[in-house]
């Protein structure tokens, strides 16, 4: 099981990989290859794929963690080079999403219309966990959320003639089975890291031995971060590869708590499970 971070807010120092605000992972197994999220711009993703020696037409399936532009912005550019491949996501993917800054609303959701996406890809939209390839699954919708969520006060959706906070109903992660263990690959984890872990443990047998990706812990206060640390201790703790929206304070707290179990994951990072 081979995992490469293709897009992140940071890139490996001294490498030819470039950075942008966004996220994309390459997942390669003996059964096929999955692109999880696409970053914000086609130019950046395609450049980093070339640096990694990955050809777009080798992609067997795509999966989207949620609709925000920094995870879906390169979708059309990729699909124009892959042919009509399966695409896995939550059915709420097409809801309009906005960010409010200084009283102004900016669209931050999917930019490609549903009708065009249906022509370019074979859509597999479900709130339930789905198998993408043997050993590669979607988490399904994170409905139970007793733990802190990865929220932004700026994110909104329409509600009739008004606005409400984005419920992040479309948020999902990818789960990899490595022998008897599980690896959690997160996009932004807007539904909450601990809530996502609870969903995975209730859906699949096995211990979560690694967590990779954006964990959206940057808005949590010190008490909430310590709670995250305490719960993660119960998991072993797992090996952690935080990036994208995890946040500097959260990265520092995780590193202080777990030391060598925490490693950065900028664009260009390759992990073999």
Image (cartoon, rainbow, N blue to C red):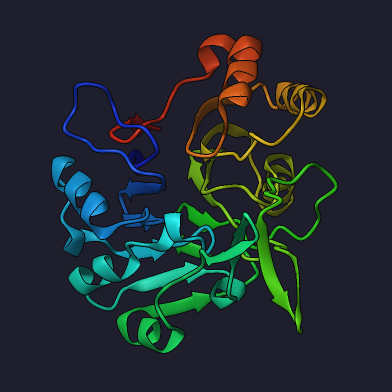
Instruction: Name the residue nearer the viewer: 143 or 74.
Output: 74
Residue 28 vertical placement versus 19 (above, below): below
- Residue drawn at (44%, 79%) of the image: 123
In-front residue for pair 178/266: 266
Instruction: Identify which residue is drawn at 26% across, 22% down.
Output: 13
Residue 106 position in % (x across, y down): 53, 65
Left or right: 39, with 229 as reference point: left
Q: The C terminus lies in which quarter of the figure?
A: top left
- Farthest-out residue, right: 146
227 vs 90: above or below = above
Q: Vertical placement of 15 versus 52: above or below?
A: above
Quarter of the image containing the N terminus?
top left
- Tell me which residue sits at (67%, 41%) in the image: 193
- Tell me how many marks there are: 0
Q: Where does the image place residue 239, in percent across and percent down from the top left?
A: 54, 24
Using the image, determine if residue 117 lies above or below residue 58. Answer: below
**Residue 33: image location, x then y, percent:** 30, 55
Image quadrant where residue 126 sits: bottom right
Expressed as whole percent of the image width and height from the top left, the position of residue 203 reads 69, 54
Does the rendering let one see residue 133? no
Residue 88 visible within the image: yes
* Residue visible at 32% across and 62% down in the picture: 74
Nearer to me, 252 or 127? 252
Name which quarter of the figure residue 34 lies in: bottom left
- Which is nearer the eye, 219 or 63? 219
């Amino acid at each position: 099981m081979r995992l490469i971070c293709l897009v992140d807010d940071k890139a490996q120092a001294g490498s030819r990989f470039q950075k942008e605000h966004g996220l994309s992972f390459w997942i390669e197994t003996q059964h096929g290859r999955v692109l999880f999220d696409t970053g914000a711009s086609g130019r950046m993703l395609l450049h980093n794929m070339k640096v990694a020696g990955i050809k777009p037409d080798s992609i067997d399936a795509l999966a989207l963690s949620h609709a925000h532009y920094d995870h879906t912005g390169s979708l059309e550019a990729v699909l124009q080079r892959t042919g009509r491949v399966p695409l896995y996501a939550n059915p709420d993917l097409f809801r309009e999403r906005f960010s409010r800054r200084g009283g102004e609303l900016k669209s931050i959701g999917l930019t490609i219309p549903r009708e065009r996406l249906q022509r370019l890809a074979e859509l597999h939209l479900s709130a339930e966990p789905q198998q993408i390839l043997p050993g590669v699954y979607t988490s399904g919708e994170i409905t139970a959320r007793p733990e802190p969520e990865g929220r932004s006060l700026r994110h909104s959706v329409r509600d009739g003639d008004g606005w409400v906070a984005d419920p992040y109903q479309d948020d999902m992660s990818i789960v990899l089975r490595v022998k008897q263990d599980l690896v959690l690959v997160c996009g932004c984890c807007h539904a909450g890291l601990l809530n996502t872990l609870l969903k995975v443990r209730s859906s699949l047998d096995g211990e979560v031995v690694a967590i990779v990706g954006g964990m959206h812990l940057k808005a949590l206060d010190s008490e909430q971060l310590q709670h995250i640390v305490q719960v993660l201790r119960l998991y072993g703790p797992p090996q952690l590869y935080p990036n994208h929206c995890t946040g500097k304070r959260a990265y520092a707290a995780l590193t202080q708590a777990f030391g060598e179990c925490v490693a950065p994951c900028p664009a260009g990072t390759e992990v073999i499970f």
